[in-house]
Image: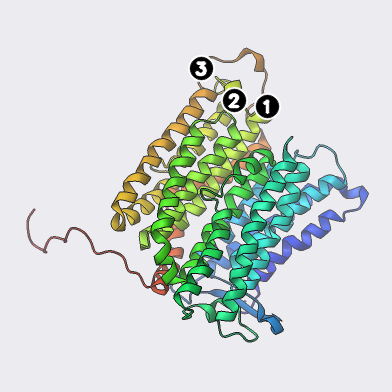
């Protein structure tokens, strides 16, 4: 199995499955979602098998494949994963079957429309695997842009009342970022050695490209990643897209696709443009702090449940970017772990919110109240997801947020203090939301509303396991990502700050 093309197969299976689902004959159209779910489980099994073969202390990129694709332009089909990419591929292949199961009744009519809906999920899974696995800059850009197509149709064709507006806004923002990045990609190629493999990440790392050129290319890449992340002030597409998309689509959009932005900062901005990254760090940290506070404040003021969850993600992405640009090992390890943990906690929030909306028929928080007496199991899962989102100790987000703050305090204490305010605000927006929706007297108008069903239990069960499991045993992820983080730190040319307090000499008393 040493030469088995793991990443290619993991990416190709859902794409082939999408074609099968879309072309099912009329007599089998009712089986579209079952086929899609079965297909989505294959990449999950393959990724688990691949992950068991990953050597944390081995080469930086493993399971590599390299084939010349368009040699005249230096483009290769080159894929491979380090620890950071591996955990994000795993996040994508875990959430995809969860979302397909959650989307079971999103399209009421059986037929071509339902087939297309589930086929688009599988196409999107292929793009997510490809974008995290690409080690050729141009190939990464292809996947980066291709992701827009299935998301646009999933929102624009299957979303809420304002779906067309939300889909077009998402597309325009993403295309603007992608076009700016394309300029940077082309400039990077001409700054490098060129040739048949001129876009390979390994050939473009460590170039001496001049101060001005490096800064401009950094800005081109960073702008695209900031839009995708999403960071203030280019975040405004997210609340509209997340609120109008079907909840399973919002999960993949916010839980996985937006991680491409922060992943790109680690994978491309820092190693390719180390001097420019250090130059831009003060401004990026300020933008990250603004995102943390601004997103939290807007979340507190929301009456729309889905928009509230979307704004919490703006705040969380501020923490992730802060950890990346703190330029410390704890900060970057915490940010990577945060990407994974945020994916699971936000998935639980969106999917449970969709269950409540389906029962109540409203997204407005004031229309609820007392629902823990109506659906106690759903309320319990909602509370668990909320506690994870505000980083309660023992749940997944706590360790990642703690590491980000430790890494930030060690180099930028003032920024760490400001970021800590975001934790207080997170407690406010989560607890106030739960209080308004779940506590109080039992509403009389919803008598007979059913609680968590069997299929819904299968949807939330993996998320609960991940939230609690990674809260208790984060070492599972940290051992995988730490070597990749150390390699990135070396490429950027930074080291962790020395301890501010010298350790006591051995044998001395306090």
Residue 259 x %, y %: 55, 55
Q: Are marks 3 and 1 in contact (CB under 8 Å)?
A: no
Give the number of the mark in front: 3 or 2. Answer: 3
Mark positioned earlier in the residue sequence (2 or 1)? 1
Residue placed under numbered mark 2 in the picture = 375
Residue placed under numbered mark 3 in the picture = 440
Q: Quadrant of the N terminus?
A: bottom right
Q: Are marks 2 and 1 in contact (CB under 8 Å)?
A: yes
From the viewer's side, name the closer residue of 411 and 338: 411
Q: Give above or below for 398 relative to 178.
A: above
Residue placed under numbered mark 1 in the picture = 359
From the viewer's side, name the closer residue of 112 and 462: 112
Residue 334 x %, y %: 41, 56
From the viewer's side, name the closer residue of 84 and 374: 84
| Residue 46 visible | no
At x 75%, y 53%, the residue is 120
Give the number of the mark in front: 2 or 1. Answer: 1
Mark positioned earlier in the residue sequence (3 or 2)? 2
Q: Give above or below for 92 relative to 132.
A: above
Secondary structure under tag 3 reads loop
Residue 186 left/right relative to 399? right
Q: CA distance from mark 3 to mark 1?
A: 18 Å
Q: Are marks 3 and 2 in contact (CB under 8 Å)?
A: no
Q: Give above or below for 284 relative to 99.
A: below
Q: Quadrant of residue 163?
A: top right
Residue 115 x %, y %: 82, 49
Mark positioned earlier in the residue sequence (3 or 1)? 1
At x 48%, y 69%, the residue is 215
At x 64%, y 57%, the residue is 176
């Amino acid at each position: 199995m040493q030469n088995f093309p793991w990443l290619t197969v993991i990416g190709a299976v859902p794409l082939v499955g999408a074609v099968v689902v879309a072309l099912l004959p009329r007599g089998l159209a009712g089986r579209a979602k079952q086929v899609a779910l079965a297909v989505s489980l294959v990449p999950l099994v393959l990724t688990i098998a691949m992950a068991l073969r990953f050597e944390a202390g081995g080469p930086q990129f493993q399971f590599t494949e390299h084939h010349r694709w368009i040699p005249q332009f230096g483009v290769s089909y080159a894929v491979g994963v380090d620890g950071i990419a591996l955990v994000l591929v795993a996040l994508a292949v875990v959430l995809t079957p969860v979302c397909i199961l959650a989307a079971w009744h999103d399209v009421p009519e059986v037929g071509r429309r339902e087939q297309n809906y589930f086929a688009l999920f599988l196409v999107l899974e292929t793009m997510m695997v490809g974008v995290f696995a690409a080690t050729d800059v141009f190939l990464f850009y292809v996947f980066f842009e291709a992701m827009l197509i299935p998301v646009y149709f999933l929102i624009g064709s299957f979303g809420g009342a304002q779906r067309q507006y939300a889909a077009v806004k998402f597309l325009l923002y993403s295309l603007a970022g992608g076009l700016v990045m394309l300029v940077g990609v082309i400039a990077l190629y001409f700054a490098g050695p060129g040739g048949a493999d001129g876009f390979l990440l390994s050939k473009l790392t460590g170039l001496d490209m001049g101060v001005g050129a490096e800064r401009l290319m950094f800005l081109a890449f960073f702008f695209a990643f900031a839009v995708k992340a999403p960071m203030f002030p280019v975040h405004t597409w997210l609340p509209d897209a997340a609120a109008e998309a079907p909840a399973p689509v919002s999960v993949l959009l916010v839980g996985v696709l937006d991680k491409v932005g922060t992943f790109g900062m680690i994978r491309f901005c820092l190693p390719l443009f180390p001097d420019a990254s250090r130059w831009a760090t003060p401004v990026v940290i300020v933008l990250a702090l603004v995102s943390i506070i601004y997103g939290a404040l807007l979340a507190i003021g929301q009456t729309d449940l889905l928009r509230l969850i979307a704004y919490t993600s703006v705040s969380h992405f501020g923490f992730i970017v802060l950890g990346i640009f703190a330029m410390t090992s704890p900060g970057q390890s915490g940010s990577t772990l945060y990407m994974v943990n945020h994916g699971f906690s936000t998935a639980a929030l969106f999917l449970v919110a969709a269950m409540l909306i389906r029962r109540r028929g409203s997204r407005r928080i004031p229309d609820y109240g007392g629902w823990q007496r109506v659906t106690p199991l759903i309320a319990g899962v909602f509370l668990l997801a909320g506690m994870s989102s505000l980083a309660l100790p023992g749940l997944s987000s706590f360790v990642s947020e703690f590491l980000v703050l430790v890494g930030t305090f060690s180099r930028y204490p003032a920024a760490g203090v400001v970021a800590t305010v975001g934790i207080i605000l997170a407690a406010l927006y989560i607890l106030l939301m739960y209080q308004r929706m779940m506590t109080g007297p039992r509403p009389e108008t919803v008598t007979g509303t059913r609680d968590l069903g069997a299929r819904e239990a299968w949807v939330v069960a993996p998320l609960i396991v991940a939230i609690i499991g990674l809260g208790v045993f984060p070492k599972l992820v940290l051992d995988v990502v730490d070597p990749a983080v150390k390699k990135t730190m070396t490429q950027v040319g930074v080291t962790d700050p020395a301890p501010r307090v010298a350790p006591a000499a051995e044998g001395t008393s306090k």
